[in-house]
Image (cartoon, rainbow, N blue to C red):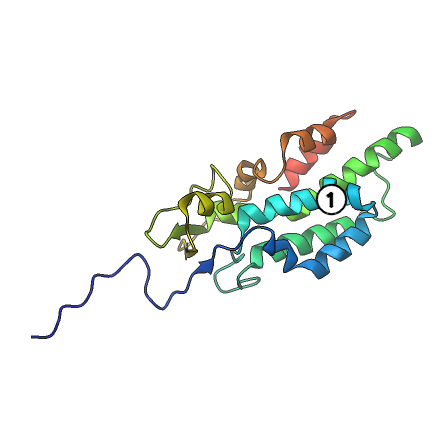
Amino acid sequence: MPDPQPAMGPFPASDPGFAALPVDELPAQNADLIARIKLCYGSDRDGFERDVLALIRRYAAYVHLLPATADNYFSSPGGLLRLGLETAFFSLQGTDAHIFSGRSTISVRRQLEPRWRLATFIGGLCCELHRVLSHAIVTDADGNEWPAYLQPLADWLTRRGAERYFVRWRPNAIETRGLGVFALAHVVPADTLQFLNDDNAVIVPHLLASI
């Protein structure tokens, strides 16, 4: 008699999954775009690393190499990271020569403009964050599922000691953009939100509405 077929694991052998790369390697794959973001942001090196690059690293830790879609746009490994960076860049670029808080005094506008620009960048970076919660199911090789509401994907992979992970796409997933707000805290720390909120009561609400 022929040998019985081996039991199927959580994923077929043909699914290579995604490598659990260190977080620092992820922004490096988008160095060209990050350089353009730095030029557009117009800050010195320390300011850029504090205000922007730290957010990019946190976003990369959360989405890791996840594609943005199963088989449409930005569907390759790292697609969601690239999509966020591209949208953030074009959003930031759109703030050039834009007058924020136009009815305020010049001194108030000068004070709020950096906050508006940073909030615009964050809104672009996180605009598709909801997809992680509504469209994708991420597991390790043993079938353990990533609790995406609780922690960034990179942190979970480290705690699990996983070398690779796998993605399944929910059939007929409902587009629920508001879910992105629940993941925002994993990307944007509380002190950044407080900075955006200082001396005004409009920037953070507009940011949340855009996500």
- 10 Å neighbourhood of mark 1: few (<14), some, or many (≥20)? some
Image location of residue 135, percent across then percent down? 46, 51
Image location of residue 207, percent across then percent down? 68, 37
The residue furthest bottom is 1
Observer-nearest residue: 11 or 201?
11
Return the residue at label 1.
49
**Residue 134 against residue 8 in the figure, above or below:** above
Name the image quarter holding residue 204.
top right
Question: Which quadrant holds the C terminus?
Answer: top right
Kindly tell me whether residue 74 is visible in this rendering: yes
Observer-nearest residue: 128 or 103?
128
Name the image quarter holding residue 183.
top right
> Residue visible at 81% across and 52% down?
40
Image location of residue 156, percent across then percent down? 45, 44
The residue furthest right is 106
4 sits to left or right of 27: left
> Residue visible at 42% across and 41% down?
147
129 sits to left or right of 166: right
Question: Regarding mark 1 in the picture, which secondary structure is present there?
Answer: helix
23 sits to left or right of 207: left
Observer-nearest residue: 134 or 10?
10
